[in-house]
Image (cartoon, helix red, strand yellow):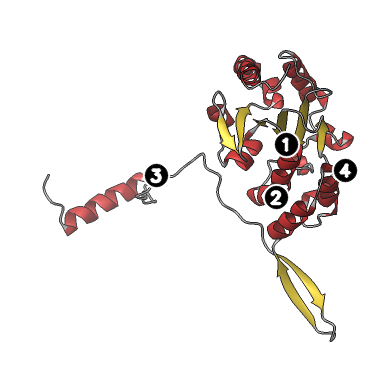
Amino acid sequence: MEQMNWHMAWAALEWQAELGAVDAIGDVPIDRYGVPAEKPKPVVTTVVSALGITAAVALDPVAIAANSAAAAQDLAGLKQALQDFPHCELQRGARNLVFSDGIPGARVMILGEAPGREEDLHGLPFVGPAGLLLDKMLAAIGLNRAENVYIGTVIPWRPPQNREPKAEEIAMMMPFVRRHVALAAPDVLICMGNTSCSAILDKRGVNKLRGQWHEGLGLPVLPMVHPSNLLRQPAGKKQAWQDLLALKAWLREYAVGEL
């Protein structure tokens, strides 16, 4: 190919501009499914010293969350730590903290996204139509939240208008999520929905992630489509059934006793 001179290059650039190309393409591919790193903004508070000097101090809410979560010695203590955590704005508009349901110590832990209206009213994850569907799905493979399933959420407070949680809100809650999983001590983790996959796997696109096993927080992780999405798109129930069968097979293969 003939080497391009200055005039040829300028003409080519003008032609691309006329076509509407205004952004240069980078040398490195962009991961469209990755979760952008976004740290919560520092919280500025006023501190008065023993000498009466007033100063503004910036606090890191993630660091505060990490210290608070690490101090919790059991699930009850972790729930109280969340209730006492003052730096997440979602708490101001929510009716109830949605912490968990089911049996702590169960082999299967389901990690949901954020509470909806019904969850916010009852203070429990997966209630209402989506919760009923989840119960039917679990019953189909011999599981239920009253005996052998534990359920938690990434975000414990309902976002306004059920909007998707922001990256900074997820980052703020992650120390509590990690501690929650550690204290619940499941054998396997089910991430239901994009928010849960983002938090645990640092990836989005549950429809692309489902159907295969992953690793997160030192546990085998199975992504699944959220039941609320299945209610809106019933065609996805076939794939959800395949995922449930994969979970059942895993539990049998790595059984420590009778399921």
> Which amino acid, mark 3?
Pro
Q: Secondary structure at mark 1?
A: loop
Q: Is residue 91 above or below residue 206?
A: below
Question: Disc 1 to disc 2, how far (Cα)?
Answer: 15 Å
Structural crowding at the residue carrying mark 4, measured as other residues with C-alpha within 10 Å and reported as few (<14), some (14–19) or many (≥20): some
Kindly identify which numbered label has been placed on residue 224.
none
Q: Secondary structure at mark 3?
A: loop
> Which quadrant of the figure contains the N terminus?
top left
First of labels 2, 3 by sequence position: 3
Question: Disc 2 to disc 4, how far (Cα)?
Answer: 23 Å
| Residue 30 position in % (x across, y down) | 43, 45
Structural crowding at the residue carrying mark 1, measured as other residues with C-alpha within 10 Å and reported as few (<14), some (14–19) or many (≥20): some
Question: Disc 1 to disc 4, how far (Cα)?
Answer: 28 Å
> Which amino acid, mark 4?
Arg
Disc 2 designates what residue? Answer: 175
Disc 4 designates what residue? Answer: 95
Kindly identify which numbered label has been placed on residue 185.
1
| Discs 1/4, front | 1
Asked which quadrant contains residue 67, the reply is bottom right
Disc 3 designates what residue? Answer: 29
| Discs 2/4, front | 2
